[in-house]
Amino acid sequence: MEILGKVHSIESFGSADGPGVRFLIFLHGCPLRCQFCHNPDTWGSQKFTEETADALLKKAVRYKDYWGTNGGITVSGGEPLYQIDFLLDLLKKAKAQGINTCIDTSGGCFTHEGEWFAKFEELMQYTDLLLLDIKEINNERHKVITGKENTNILEMARYLSDIKKPVWIRHVLVPERSDYDEDLKALHDFIETLDNVQRVEVLPYHTLGVYKWKELGIPYKLEGIDPPTPKRVANAKALLHTDEYH
Ligand code: SF4
């Protein structure tokens, strides 16, 4: 029986989530509860469609002519690793069609334990690139922002470095939550210990998804916090040495 994926939405043309032009697939569900999440409707609601990998890939390849030499598909969310069986099926089939594959992940599901890890190891055979969010290097602040520890996320970064799987590290910059010079320096020091980082990106916090929190009736904990100033964004980029990773 074919595995069904719970799909939140798709976008035909993405240019910010991986190299080149990409077909974006947003999967439902996430173990984190980020205060700045712009897709909180991927958490507990029943707003998703069920699709097979074949059906999704059929939609994706309609746009193949636009992908050029380095485009392809990016699976995001929510948290794509939350549905690892479906993700494995999807990327295995994508690779069989020669499609460039990218996973946009928070790493929140990662564990070295048992069956899940065996599936993740196999999944890496079909994954060209991971966009890995490190939302805070300071574990206490990470817990405040996401509701979970970062220990397993940093372990995932280390594992991907060990197997030399290319990653882009992304840091969402939120004033009063993840914009501290000492943490940005510590994050840079951590990244410097990895062997597989192709790019480091600062993603300035924005408020475009706030309306969804209101619609869902979930209290928004960043009320009154504005996006970071251009000066703070430039500061974060400098402390993370983003220009050295392009
Ligand atoms: S990891 Fe992504 S989808 Fe999950 S809560 Fe955080 S921002 Fe939202």
Image (cartoon, grey):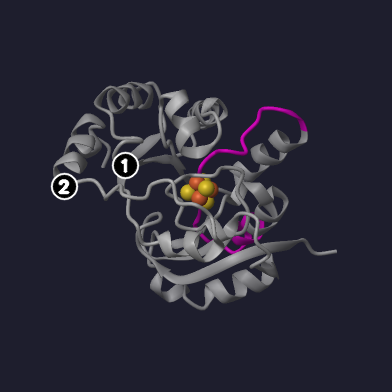
Q: Secondary structure at mark 2?
A: helix
**Residue plotted at (49% across, 59% down):** 213
- Badge 1: residue crowd in 10 Å (few <14, some 14–19, many ≥20): many
- Badge 2: residue crowd in 10 Å (few <14, some 14–19, many ≥20): few
Instruction: Give, as a three-letter code, the residue at label 1.
Output: Leu
Decide which of 162, 243 is in the foreground and name it.
243
Q: Is residue 98 magenta?
A: yes
| Residue that sits furthest to the left in the current view | 231
Residue at mark 2 to residue at mark 1: CA–CA distance:
11 Å
Decide which of 107, 204 is in the foreground and name it.
204
Identify the residue position indicated by label 2 in the image: 230
Above or below residue 74? Residue 221 is: above
First to last magenta residue range:
91-114
The image quadrant that residue 175 belongs to is top left
Above or below residue 58? Residue 150 is: above
Identify the residue position indicated by label 1 in the image: 173
Count numbered badges in the picture.
Answer: 2
- Disc assigned to residue 203: none
| Residue that sits furthest to the bottom in the current view | 62
Q: Where is residue 56 shown, x and y percent of the image?
A: 62, 70
Q: Where is residue 168 shown, x and y percent of the image?
A: 39, 42
**Residue plotted at (32% across, 42% down):** 174
Lateral position of residue 231 relative to residue 198, left or right: left
Residue 62 in sight here: yes
